[in-house]
Amino acid sequence: MTFKVKDYYFHKAKKENFLARSIYKLEEVDQKYKIIKKDDFVIDLGYHPGSWIQYTSKKIGDQGLVIGCDIRDINKALLPIKNVRVFQKDVLTIETMEELGVSEQFDVVLSDMAPNTTGIKTVDQDRSLLLVEMVFSLLPKFLKPNGNMVVKVFDSHQAQMFLKDQKKMFNEYHYLKPKSTRTVSKEFFVIGKGFRP
């Protein structure tokens, strides 16, 4: 049950040639918390359709690299971008960084992953939390010490409890509901800066 609201941000994304309105969520997070820097190596987990990759590739410049990993088919629209590589992979199956064509961990881990929603609030919250828990479990593998992360969460009591327990993994820890998030949406983003594995 996905629905597309053709609102201001939908039209803005279309006009500015971005693949999705979610671009503006990452932009706001990044402007506020300075997550992505020039020359960074970034991994975007569950990147589809790829608007976060479009934003990131501009921020990191020619010497940076953004890797998108998703179980869905590769979005060919991203292939011409020089500092972007996309893989059709389940992130849980990745054993080494070499499988992604890099030799070391990333400066930034991004995840805008959401479950296929059912419309049943508790089911959707539980499914979202499983994805969030998965991202946190992968941080020691993917994220450099002192690195940054942004993860999407569907709000729930369980999610709040889990996130509170993870706070010690970072020097700075923030929650943000970007302006471009639909008012009916229960999603927000967790921002971690200065990873302490």
Image (cartoon, rainbow, N blue to C red):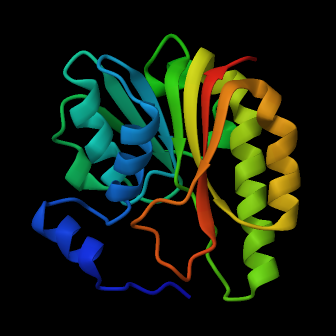
Residue at 46% from the left image edge and 69% from the top image edge: 181
Closer to us: 106 or 59: 59
For the N terminus, which image quadrant?
bottom right
Closer to us: 126 or 76: 126
Horizontal side of 36 relative to 163 (left or right) equals left
Residue 103 drawn at (x, y percent) = 49, 10
Q: Quadrant of residue 21?
A: bottom left
Horizontal side of 34 relative to 96 (left or right) equals left
Residue 35 drawn at (x, y percent) = 45, 31
Residue at 72% from the left image edge and 23% from the top image edge: 140
Residue at 42% from the left image edge and 30% from the top image edge: 34
Q: Is residue 67 above or below residue 50?
A: above
Residue at 29% from the left image edge and 82% from the top image edge: 7
Residue 179 drawn at (x, y percent) = 42, 64
Tally of numbered tags: 0
Residue 60 drawn at (x, y percent) = 28, 26
Q: Quadrant of residue 169?
A: top right
Q: Is residue 173 above or below residue 175?
A: above
